Image (cartoon, rainbow, N blue to C red):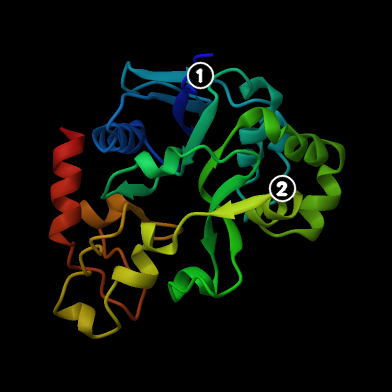
């Protein structure tokens, strides 16, 4: 019997004014440029205006459900596990919009099977040490959507409890997932943890280049990639300077913002 190849898609989510359409377009163009096979790119959003025409736009499922959730957690990401997404693709690679693609992404699409395959945050990531206990992070996730709808359903049943007892949505996802696996630590570097120069050194030197093994650079929190390459004001908070953009990032942004 001939086995069919699972249909794969990159998935992202955008709402409000934190990111503009160009931020997502840059991510899409770079991601598709770093894959050996064509895949679809899907965006869940409350406003698809300005997005590239090859981006498939879908509403964020149950978006109004998150209107009264606390500010710190990115709770609308729970919609990544909504039943409405089942059937859009067999395997999703979810990426935060503030990810920067620096290497091949094919490995991220390896079939995760029953697991929710994720980025690990915490000390394991900071120290790039796979011997340290992982902590789930939702900046990048590979998964089969039909296997994880229980995450959304549990949140829907007990939203008030979870948002009052758990600070971040990724903590909830890590607790609710039946089976977790994690990407190799060397695949994803943090701009803040691994590339930004120490205080005072950053007055003279730009951030480091990503390591050769790095496939994604995460700009979690502050600053965002655009703030670094198009600095209206210093992109680092005092006492850091945040005045020298790295050449690798300005080259990337120029290439994919075309």
Q: Is residue 188 above or below residue 47?
A: below
Q: Quick check: 131 above or below 219?
A: below
Residue in the image at 75% along x and 49% along y: 176
**SS label for mark 1:** loop
**Quadrant holding the C terminus:** top left
Q: Nearer the viewer, residue 231 or 96?
A: 96
In x, y percent, where is residue 187?
37, 57
Q: In the image, which is nearer the foreground, mark 1 or mark 2?
A: 1
Q: CA distance from mark 1 to mark 2?
A: 28 Å
Neighbour tally class for label 1: few under 14, some 14-19, many 20 plus, Cα within 10 Å: few
Asked whether residue 248 is in view, the answer is: yes
Determine whether the residue tagged by mark 2 lies in a helix, strand or loop: loop
> Percent from the top left, x then y, of residue 136?
60, 57
Residue placed at 34% from the left, 81% from the top?
239
- Residue 167 in the image: state x and y as whole percent: 70, 60
User: Which residue was labeled with disc 1?
Assistant: 3
Residue ID for mark 2? 177
Residue at horizontal 16 percent and vertical 56 percent from the top: 248
Q: Residue furthest bottom?
A: 200
* Residue located 20% across and 44% down the image: 253
- Taking 142 as reference, is 247 left or right? left
């Amino acid at each position: 019997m001939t086995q069919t190849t699972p249909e794969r898609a990159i998935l992202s989510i955008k709402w409000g004014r934190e990111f503009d359409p160009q931020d997502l377009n840059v991510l899409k163009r770079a991601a598709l440029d770093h894959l050996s096979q064509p895949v679809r790119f899907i965006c869940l959003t409350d406003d698809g205006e300005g997005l590239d025409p090859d981006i498939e736009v879908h509403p964020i499922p149950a978006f109004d459900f998150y209107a009264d959730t606390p500010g710190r957690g990115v709770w609308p990401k729970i919609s990544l596990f909504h039943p409405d997404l089942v059937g859009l693709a067999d395997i999703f690679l979810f990426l935060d919009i503030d990810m920067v693609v620096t290497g091949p992404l094919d490995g991220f699409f390896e079939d995760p099977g029953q697991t929710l395959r994720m980025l690990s945050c915490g000390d394991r990531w900071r120290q790039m040490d796979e011997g340290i206990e992982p902590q789930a992070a939702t900046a990048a996730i590979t998964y089969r959507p039909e296997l994880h709808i229980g995450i959304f359903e549990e949140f829907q049943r007990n939203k008030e409890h979870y948002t009052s007892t758990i600070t971040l949505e990724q903590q909830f996802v890590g607790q609710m997932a039946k089976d977790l696996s994690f990407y190799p630590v060397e695949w994803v570097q943090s701009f803040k943890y691994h590339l930004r120069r120490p205080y005072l050194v950053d007055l003279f030197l730009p951030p480091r280049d990503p390591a050769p093994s790095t496939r994604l650079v995460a700009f979690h929190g502050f600053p965002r990639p655009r703030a670094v390459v198009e600095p209206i004001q210093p992109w680092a908070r005092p006492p850091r300077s945040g005045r020298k953009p790295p050449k690798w990032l300005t080259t990337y942004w120029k290439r994919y913002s075309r």
